[in-house]
Image (spheres, rainbow, N blue to C red):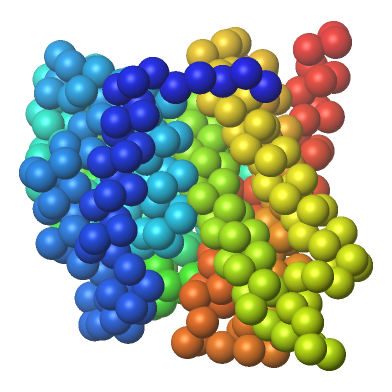
Amino acid sequence: MDFSFTDEQTMLRDSVAAYLADHYDFDKRKAAIKSPSGWRPEVWKALAEDLGILGAAFPEDVGGLGGGPIETMVVMEEFGRALVVEPYLGTVVIGGGFLKRAGTPAANELIGQIISGEVITAFAWAESQARYNLANIAVTAREDGAGWVINGQKAVVIGAPWATHLIVTARTGGAQTDAGGISVFLVEKNAKGVVARDYPTVDGRRASEITFENVSVPADALIGEAGAGLPLIEAVVDEAVAALCAESCGVLKKLHEGTLEYTKGRKQFGAPIASFQVLQHRMVDMFIQVEQAVSMTYMAHIRLGESAIERAKGVSSAKVQIGRACRFVGQNAIQLHGGMGMTDEMAIAHYFKRATMIEGEFGSVDHHLRRYEHLSLDLAA
């Protein structure tokens, strides 16, 4: 695939890479994820104020730098290479994605606060019974006077411990799995009735189980049209999956590079194990998986601007390749390192954990294969 970056996009990549190389090495990251807070607020502040990265993908009329999905892809790949845990995906890609589509003065004001680093959002969509079905929603929102009252539970809300606001999907009508009757709300994290149980995830991030107990929100907390939120959710989640694929490209490259470097230094029978032909074949197979993942990620970002079906097909096909690559490259990296590859002291173990989480995040390989099949049948019909 011939995909050339503009000079501005190349400069963006270089700026992010240089900052992370100076301020986000493995030891600093490991110390951050083991700290009580689990992240580094000073890094988030620097991304906003010193680099302007949080505004890279927003239009200029809301205070951004005028970029789009490709700029997000560039940033996310570099974040993957450094295993950044700060909530760029949940805030800029997902929170910003919903707010951009809202288009109201209040939403634009919040986008400005995202760009400045003041507002952090987390996406509360998953529920214990739903698997990856975006329409399987048991959380309810009922009209109450001029506002809404939300009740129910959301699971594994990534980044919620750091969030100031939650993007919440809720059912305002219809049965539990109906495509209609779904709405999206912006809820302040400290609102009365929001109860969070925080915990660390296996890949070093933080998440929460969120319970909504008669949480009252004003009418303008509704994002989009009441009861017609599923297409909006699908569009934003597709953008999030594409961004996640970009992050995985950075993770996969580091897994391959780290394994190649290790095998050149590790000796058996008086020779580096990288000289053994069978291991050379294995590392070539890893490299092919990485390159295919990169190409599919580029394709997914290009298709974000196409029709809803073509966008979804492009994203799902990329996620299938990414999921397969994460498993193949990650497992082979650990195998070639031996048992020490899973120790907490080695960076390769942390990249493997992140790759394993990405494999299932926003849908497994099987889920996206089924989705692609259904989309293809819909298109044929």
Q: Position of residue 41 (x, y in %)?
A: 16, 63
The C terminus is located in which quarter?
Answer: top right
Residue at left offset 12%, top offset 53%: 45
Q: Position of residue 297 (x, y in %)?
A: 60, 34
Residue 206 shown left or right of residue 220 in the figure: right
**Outermost residue toward the right in this view:** 278
Residue 258 appears in view? yes
The N terminus is located in which quarter?
Answer: top right
Q: Quadrant of residue 58?
A: top left
In depth, the one of 133 and 72 nearer the eye is: 72
Residue at left offset 76%, top offset 23%: 375
In depth, the one of 22 and 373 nearer the eye is: 22
Residue 352 appears in view? no
180 over 116 or under it: above or below: above
40 over 151 or under it: above or below: below
In depth, the one of 316 and 13 nearer the eye is: 13
Q: Position of residue 317 (x, y in %)?
A: 73, 33
